[in-house]
């Protein structure tokens, strides 16, 4: 959907600039301080809560929040499986040999690593296209992310 250029209620910015910032500010916060990266999702959440005039900015804030939700889920699953594989290898007294031979756990870890890497690339490209579309005053329907964004937006209404 194409929107006409308009102002956001967030600091009276142009709506496309506000929409771009809900994607870029959390990323910049994560780069500046990795310890703040875990709470960077608050930026799109605040934009979603504080924006009153622009459905366009609300959509992109919900979209950015959906990207964070998916990234967090993948991160915690990866940490869980990584720790599980490391601990079970250590407990089996095969930590050094586990690099070369981990049996089914090793195969599952490699497969999950590949799947998660593909998902992370997909999310990165989706976020990049979302930023480009926000600049053009357009929505983007990234599969799965757009559905989560619509669910998030349904709580606002």
Image (cartoon, rainbow, N blue to C red):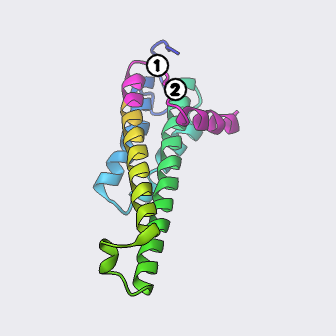
Q: Position of residue 10 (x, y in %)?
A: 48, 33
Which residue is found at the position 44% from the left and 30% from the top?
19
Res 144 quadrant in image:
top right
> Which residue is nearer to you in this view: 153 or 142?
142
Vertical relation: 70 (above or below) 56: below
Q: Which residue is mark 2?
A: 141
Q: Secondary structure at mark 2?
A: loop
Q: Residue at x 69, y 34 (%)?
A: 154
Q: Position of residue 17 (x, y in %)?
A: 39, 28
Label 2 packing within 10 angstroms: few (<14), some (14-19), many (20+): some
- In 3D space, how far apart are the residues under numbered discs 1 and 2 (Cα atoms)? 10 Å
Where does residue 143 sit, x and y in percent of width and height?
Answer: 53, 32
Q: Which residue is mark 1?
A: 138
User: Where is residue 126 shown, x and y percent of the image?
Assistant: 41, 34
Report the number of numbered marks: 2
Which residue: 53% across, 36% down?
145
140 is higher (above) or lower (below) than 61:
above
131 drawn magenta: yes
Residue 30 visible from this viewpoint: yes
In the displayed structure, would residue 25 be above or below residue 3?
below
* Residue at the image point whose x is 49% and y is 30% from the top: 142
Q: Quadrant of residue 93?
A: bottom left
Please give the range of residues in magenta: 129-157
Is residue 4 highlighted in magenta? Answer: no
Q: Quadrant of the C terminus?
A: top right
Nearest to viewer (mark 1 / mark 2) = 2
Circle 1: element type? loop
Predominant SS along the magenta part:
helix
Residue 54 seen in the figure: no
């Amino acid at each position: 959907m194409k929107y006409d250029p308009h102002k956001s209620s967030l600091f009276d910015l142009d709506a496309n600039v506000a929409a771009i910032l809900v994607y870029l500010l959390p990323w910049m916060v994560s780069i500046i301080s990795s310890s703040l990266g875990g709470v960077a999702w608050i930026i799109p959440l605040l934009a979603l809560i504080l924006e009153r005039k622009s459905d366009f900015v609300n959509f992109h804030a919900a979209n950015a929040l959906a990207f964070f939700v998916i990234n967090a889920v993948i991160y915690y699953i990866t940490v869980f499986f990584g720790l599980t594989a490391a601990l079970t290898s250590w407990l089996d007294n095969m930590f050094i040999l586990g690099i070369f031979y981990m049996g089914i756990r090793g195969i599952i870890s490699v497969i999950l690593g590949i799947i998660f890497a593909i998902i992370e690339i997909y999310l990165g490209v989706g976020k990049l296209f979302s930023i480009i579309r926000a600049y053009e005053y357009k929505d983007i329907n990234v599969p799965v992310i757009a559905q989560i964004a619509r669910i998030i937006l349904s709580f606002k209404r």
